[in-house]
Every structure is written in structure tokens, then in C-alpha cells.
Image: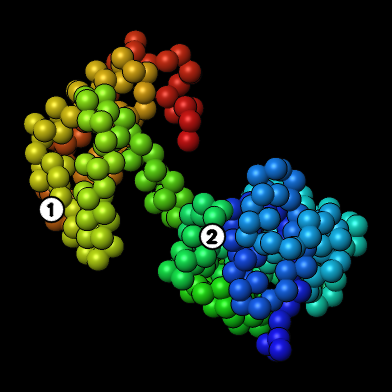
Amino acid sequence: MAKPGRLGVGIIGAGKVGAVLGAALRGAEHAVVGVSAVSEASRERAETLLPGVPVLEIQDIVERSELVLLAVPDDALGELVDGLAKLGAWQPGQLVAHTSGRFGVGILKPVRAAGAIPLALHPAMTFTGMSLDLTRLMDCTFGVTADAAMLPIAQALVVEMGAEPVAIAEADRTLYHAALAHSSNHLVTLVAQASQLLREIGVETPEHMLGPLLRATLENALASGESALTGPVARGDVGTVAAHAEALKEYDAGAGGDVLTAYLAMARATARRAVNRGLLKEGQLDEIDDALDSGMPDKSDRPDNGPAEQEGN
């Protein structure tokens, strides 16, 4: 016998997030009535995580579903929602949830205009698109945004998936997402850069060297915040910082890499936070800045990409 309040769920986008959340909702005894999957990889993912669920056209999924989960890239979300609104696809009383971190419910304005209920459910987790992600949900938080009257519905859906909901205000969604991207995405870049340097000097398995260090650092930082900060910048060890900058300048000049840029930016940010924590004095901050300046590429060494302030972001 089915639990009361079970929904017919349609998944639009069988990417890593959509397939996993669909499987989690199915595990909570909701009925997944259809999934859209265009690429071969997404079809295989749907077959693995949502066996027996039919692959349908998007409009058919919306027509059959009481809850539509929009698990598509951020930049595709608005166009998809608008396009379905023009087709008259959205239904009064229907729940429509997207998984974008960047957006709240404002982007679902056409959904609201049709009488459907907009929700934003973003998992603060990185997924592989495999069944092990279902276990990760048990230790996962979702950034949830919804109208006040509908917030309990959004929260309940997250709890049913085994995760913890945290309410995020509509106006704060971009900062919320920037915080997650800065921590998770840039961590991957930092690890990749550190691994690259170690391999270059002959360390065959840099992951074995970095793994214990990074795990301990992350645990300490989460438990103690900036009190866990250590290293040459926090100690005001100017000579070491200058040596790092010079060595990375020489390395990047030969490798045409991006390690120096990342190191200088993070070292400057670290120094300023160390001052705010009382670990460094202002005079020491100036010395650190001077040491880092010694690692700045000479103008003649920089690629001809126009003024520095127009490069990347």
C-alpha cells in the first residue's frame, strides 16, 4: 500500500543530479512517471538509476507529473520554463522544482502564472551520477527557496530524500551558489595544481602525499574555522613566501601554466585574513605583499591578451 501524499514525479534531465534525485524520490515511494534523456550517457544513467522508467518527450513528462523536477544547466533553465509556458504545459496545482544553485523561484515566474507551485531545491553536493550518490545524500544539505506557505513542502521533499533542507532567501541565491562553487570547484583546481607540481618533481602518487594533509586540513578548518590556519603566510615567514613566488614564477614561465596566478591570489587573501585574526601585523602584511610582488610575471613575460584587468574572471 502506497504512503499517503505520494506523487507522480517527472524528471527533466537525466544528468548526474536529475537521475540521482529521481532515484531518491523513488526510494521514498514516489512514482517516477517519466524521464527525459537525450545523450547516450544520460540514457545509460536513467537505465541504471531509474530502471523501468520510460524515457519520454519533455511535454509528455510535464503532462503526466504532479511534481516536475527540472535538472538542467543554469543557462538552459529560463528558456525551458518559458518554452513550456508558451505551449501551455504547466498545470494549476502542479509542483515544479528546479535544482539550480544560482536561481531561486523568480526564474519560475511562468510556472506561477499558470497556477503551478515553484520550488528551488539545490543539493550542496557533487555527484558522480552513480548509485553511491544516494548514500552521499544522507550527509547532504539542500539550499531550499520557496514561497513561505510552500516552504514546508520543499523541506519535506528534501527530508524524504534523506537530506537536510536549509532555507535560502531569494535575494541570496547567487551568493549562496558562489560560496559553494568557490569552495568545491576551486578546491579541485588547487588539488590538481598541487598534484601537477609534485609529479613534475618526481612524486609518482601525489594523491598519497596530499590525501592525509588535505583531509586533516579540511576537518580542522570545518571544526575551527580560521583558527586552523597555519603555514608561512600566517606565520609571516616572508623569506619562504618570496621563495615560493620566485619558484612558481620560474615554473609557470616554462610550463605556460596558471599555478602562480592562483598562488598569489590565495596568498594575498590568506594574508589579509591573518591580519584580521591578529596573526599578522600590518607591517608584516606589507612585507608579504612585497614578497608576492617579486613573483609577479614581468610585462614582457605576459601573454598579449590586452590589459590585465580584462583577463579572465
Q: How many marks?
A: 2
Separation of residues labelled 1 and 2 (CA atoms):
45 Å
Disc 2 residue crowd, few under 14, some 14–19, many 20+, Cα 10 Å: some
- Position of 284 with respect to 89 (left or right) is left
Would you say residue 27 is visible in this rendering?
Answer: yes
For the residues bearing labels 1 and 2, Cβ distance under 8 angstroms: no
Q: Is residue 309 above or below residue 150?
A: above
Q: Which residue is mark 2?
A: 131
Estimate how packed mark 1 is, as few (under 14), some (14 to 19) or many (20 or more) residues with alpha carbons within 10 Å. some
Question: Which residue of the protein is positioned furthest toward the right in this rendering?
Answer: 87
Q: Quadrant of the N terminus?
A: bottom right
The residue drawn where x is 34% and y is 10% is 300
Q: Is residue 85 left or right of residue 136?
A: right
Q: Is residue 156 above or below residue 248?
A: below
- x, y percentage for residue 245? 21, 27
Secondary structure of residue under mark 2: loop
In the rendered view, does 181 fall on the left or right side of 82? left
Q: Position of residue 137 (x, y in %)?
A: 49, 67
At horizontal 18% and vertical 29% (from top left) the residue drawn is: 244
Q: Which picture quadrant has residue 64?
A: bottom right
Mark linked to residue 92: none
Locate residue 138, reporting x and y percent.
Answer: 46, 71
- Quadrant for residue 263, please give it: top left
Q: Tell me the quarter of the picture where residue 261 sits.
A: top left
The three-letter amino acid code for the residue at tag 1 is Leu
Q: Is residue 77 visible?
A: no
Amino acid under disc 2: Ser
Q: What label sits on residue 279 in the rendered view? A: 1
Q: Secondary structure at mark 1?
A: loop
